[in-house]
């Protein structure tokens, strides 16, 4: 699995390769390119199918000026704006099901970068209807479970740590294992590392496109993205892309 910095470098190389292939087959790909294709290509950057994503990269790279202008209005949303988040939380209780689902998906895409805002919303939940309160609770639970799974993957066996004092105690007919006075949960669980949120994957691909375009306007947009949430991978990816662009000068 690629780390975020390596992923960004690989994506840049793939963008260049796709652009090279496209230049050799421009007539065949002409129907997929052009400014009218940009919104659909932006959506396709979310795809888990690499072929679909590669076609989207090709379409975006073929119209540098229009692509930068389009991304200028969309990439900035990577930074969790407080007023925007407040609006999304309220939409969790909207009467329209599709509005509720869209808000839930967008908030999910921010991952744990909005934990503090969601905790605040939960504490002031009296201003939300029951549907919104329940969805906030579910979002926080999802973040907590993901963090616990990540911690379990990175920390390894808790019994192998220095200073750990495990012991067994019988409660009725049930055997319990305690570590430093706390019961150890022995319930079997299959823990798989969570992949990046779709929004982050799309951001990584879009950042690679901007780096490939490499114009002053593209660099300016990368600088804006680089000011995003400090814990969000796209922020670091944009910073790395800017550093590589500067090193080429």
Image (cartoon, helix red, strand yellow):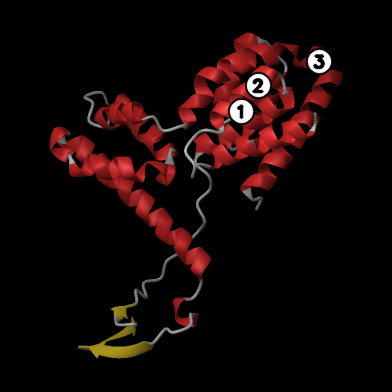
Task: Say which mark, if any, is on residue 222.
Answer: 1
The span from disc 3 to disc 1 (Cα, nearest Å) is 28 Å
Sequence-first disc among 2 and 3: 3
- Indicate the secondary structure of the residue bearing disc 3: helix
**Front of the two marks 3 and 1:** 1
The span from disc 1 to disc 2 (Cα, nearest Å) is 6 Å
Q: Position of residue 68 (x, y in %)?
A: 62, 17
The span from disc 2 to disc 3 (Cα, nearest Å) is 23 Å
Q: Position of residue 94 (x, y in %)?
A: 23, 26
Left or right, 226 with respect to 127, comes to right
Q: Position of residue 4 (x, y in %)?
A: 62, 46
Label 2, residues with CA under 10 Å away: few <14, some 14-19, many ≥20? many
Q: Residue furthest right?
A: 24
Left or right, 191 with respect to 35, comes to left
Query: Residue beneath label 2, please?
Result: 218
Residues 223 and 72: in front is 223
Does 106 sit above or below residue 179?
Answer: above
Q: Quadrant of residue 121?
A: top left
Q: Residue at x 67, y 40 (%)?
A: 8
Query: Residue beneath label 3, please?
Result: 26
Q: Is residue 134 visible?
A: no
Q: Position of residue 45 (x, y in %)?
A: 59, 29
Does 218 sit above or below residue 113?
Answer: above
Q: Is residue 1 visible?
A: yes
Residues 118 and 103: in front is 118
- Indicate the secondary structure of the residue bearing disc 2: helix
Q: Residue at x 49, y 76 (%)?
A: 157
């Amino acid at each position: 699995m690629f780390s975020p910095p390596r992923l960004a470098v690989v994506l840049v190389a793939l963008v260049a390769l796709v652009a090279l292939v496209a230049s050799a087959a421009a007539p065949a790909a002409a129907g997929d390119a052009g400014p009218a294709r940009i919104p659909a290509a932006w959506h396709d950057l979310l795809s888990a199918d690499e072929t679909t994503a590669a076609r989207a990269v090709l379409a975006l790279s073929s119209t540098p000026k229009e692509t930068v202008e389009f991304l200028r209005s969309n990439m900035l949303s990577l930074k969790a704006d407080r007023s925007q988040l407040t609006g999304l939380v309220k939409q969790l209780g909207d009467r329209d099901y599709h509005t509720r689902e869209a808000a839930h998906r967008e908030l999910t895409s921010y991952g744990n970068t909005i934990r503090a805002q969601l905790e605040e919303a939960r504490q002031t939940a009296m201003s939300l209807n029951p549907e919104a309160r329940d969805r906030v609770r579910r979002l926080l639970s999802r973040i907590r479970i993901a963090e616990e799974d990540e911690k379990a993957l990175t920390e390894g066996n808790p019994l192998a740590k220095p200073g750990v004092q495990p012991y067994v105690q019988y409660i009725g007919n049930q055997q319990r294992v305690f570590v430093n006075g706390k019961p150890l949960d022995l319930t079997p669980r299959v823990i798989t590392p969570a992949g990046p949120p779709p929004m982050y994957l799309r951001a990584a691909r879009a950042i690679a496109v901007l780096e490939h375009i490499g114009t002053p306007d593209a660099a300016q947009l990368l600088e804006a993205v680089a000011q995003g949430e400090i814990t969000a991978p796209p922020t670091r990816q944009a910073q790395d892309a800017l550093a590589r662009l500067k090193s080429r000068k």
